[in-house]
Image: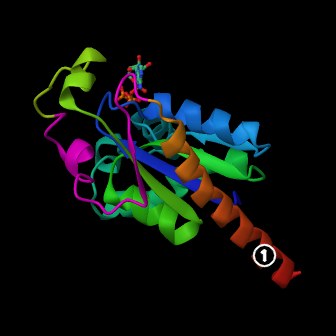
Amino acid sequence: MPKCVVAISGKRKSGKDYCTKILKQALENRQVAVAVTGISNSLKMEFAKIHGLDYAELLTDGPYKEKYRREMIKAAINPFISTDVVIVSDCRRPSDYRFFTENYSTLTVRVETSDEHRHERGFKFVDGVDDADSECALDLHNFDAVLRNLTGEDLTPQVERIMDIVFEILDKEKKKNIVNK
Ligand SMILES: Nc1ncnc2c1ncn2[C@@H]1O[C@H](COP(=O)(O)OP(=O)(O)OP(=O)(O)O)[C@@H](O)[C@H]1O
């Protein structure tokens, strides 16, 4: 099981992938083994196909999804069982965060930026997407850390603060392992 999951969310074109890459590199520079994964719709589609499930149902927050959510997210994380830190770069729903915090030592990170920067990065509002739950359900969530990703801003101090929390989690996990041995 990974020692720490960094669960990243953010609006479309906020810079989730961009920030994920910077955080990954910064952690690797400190000799931490890092993997990046996602729980994107394509994974859900693949999961539905393999298990003969209804893909549309899987995208809702209903009981059907509840039932398979655990398996789906495990499928995203399982290949990285011996990696110290797994960054999940596309969390969208409170249920995603619930699953991670209940099952892993998790740090929830929100990538935020201005609408202006999102537009510069190619964002165009789409009815039924940008006002849907998958885009808005985490708007008022209480995140462990917020990364303000304004173009041209040096992200280093913010990334370092996040790394400090990751190192605290890794330290705690190490101590837990020693006690359990
Ligand atoms: N701080 C930044 N400085 C320069 N370019 C940036 C910055 N943040 C993001 N970008 C650029 O903006 C574009 C969108 O960023 P990115 O793909 O990381 O966003 P995202 O939130 O992952 O998008 P999506 O919602 O499509 O998954 C990319 O081309 C990325 O390189």
Q: Position of residue 157 (x, y in %)?
A: 52, 42
- Specify the segment rendered in magenta: 129-153
Dominant secondary structure of the residues highlighted in magenta in the image: loop
Ligand 1's quadrant = top left
87, above or below 141, in the image: above
Q: Is residue 97 magenta?
A: no
Q: How is the image coloured?
A: rainbow
19, above or below 98, in the image: above
Say which quadrant the N terminus sits in: bottom right
Q: Is residue 133 magenta?
A: yes
90, above or below 66, in the image: above
Q: Which residue is mark 1?
A: 175
Tell me: 166 left or right of 128. right
Determine if residue 28 is in view.
yes
Q: What residue is rendered at 78% in x and 75% in y?
A: 175
Residue 19 vs residue 156, the one in the foreground = 156
**Callout 1 amino acid:** Lys
Q: What residue is rendered at 32% in x and 63% in y?
A: 142
Q: Is disc 1's CB within 8 Å of ligand 1? A: no
Residue 2 vs residue 65, the one in the foreground = 2
Say which quadrant the C terminus sits in: bottom right
Total count of labels: 1
Determine if residue 75 is in view.
no
Residues packed near mark 1 inside 10 Å, few (<14), some (14 to 19) or many (20 plus): few
Residue 70 vs residue 120, the one in the foreground = 120
Q: What residue is rendered at 80% in x and 43% in y?
A: 31
Q: What residue occupies the far bottom of the structure in this picture?
A: 179
Tell me: 173 left or right of 119. right
Q: Position of residue 145 (x, y in %)?
A: 43, 55
